[in-house]
Image (tube, helix red, strand yellow):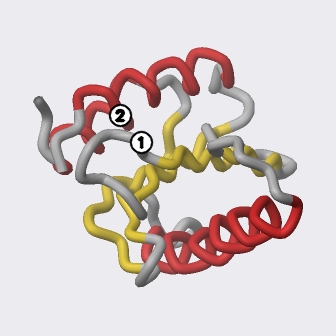
Amino acid sequence: MANTETALKEATTVIDGALGAALVDYSSGMALGTIGGGKDLDLTVAAAGNTDVVRAKVRTMEMLGLKEEIEDILITLGTQYHLIRLLKSRGSNGLFLYLALDKQRANLAMARHQLRKIEAELDV
């Protein structure tokens, strides 16, 4: 089992094109851990902003009566992918992994696969 720091480090080293990653509590909007980012990608701001995205999607699904679980949410920008993966493992309710990727270097399918694997090994 990997802790938060190890999981985030793995996300940015194993996943091609990773620019930064965060583990976020979407009940508070707080980043529980971050790695990477920089002046053009403030992961603390991204954590808070993406919390709004997750809350909105959860609310919409409730209003629609959908009984599905969100696996991940993809935001595609001109030069980046932003991937949000809601955690399903025991003790991780209300948490998501956030991953920013360079669109030119990333393989989205592999990034999703690796993020799923990291989630499975994460012990929160």
CB-based contact (under 8 Å), mark 1 and mark 2: yes
Q: Secondary structure at mark 2?
A: helix
Q: Nearer the viewer, residue 8 or 96?
A: 96
Give how far apart the Cα atoms at labels 1 and 2 are. Answer: 8 Å
Q: Position of residue 98 (x, y in %)?
A: 50, 52
* Count of numbered badges drawn on the protein: 2
- Mark in the foreground, 1 or 2: 1
Q: Which residue is mark 1?
A: 88
The quarter holding residue 63 reads bottom right
Q: Nearer the viewer, residue 67 or 9?
A: 67
Pointer 1 local density, CA inside 10 Å: few below 14, some 14–19, many at least 20? some
Name the residue at 64% across, 25% down.
105
115 shown above or below 45:
above
Q: Which quadrant of the figure contains the N terminus?
A: top left
Disc 2 marks which amino acid? Glu
Q: Position of residue 41 (x, y in %)?
A: 55, 66
Using the image, tell me which numbered label, if any, was put on residue 78.
Answer: none
Q: Secondary structure at mark 1?
A: loop
Name the residue at 23% across, 28% down.
121
Q: Nearer the viewer, residue 72 or 11?
A: 72
Q: Position of residue 88 (x, y in %)?
A: 41, 42
Q: Position of residue 86 (x, y in %)?
A: 51, 49
Name the residue at 45% across, 21% down.
114
Q: Is residue 35 left or right of residue 122?
A: right
Q: Is residue 63 left or right of residue 72?
A: right
Name the residue at 51% across, 23% down.
16
Mark 1 or mark 2: whose residue is earlier in sequence: 1
Q: Is residue 71 left or right of residue 90?
A: right
Pointer 2 local density, CA inside 10 Å: few below 14, some 14–19, many at least 20? many
Disc 1 marks which amino acid? Lys
Using the image, tell me which numbered label, if any, was put on residue 119.
Answer: 2
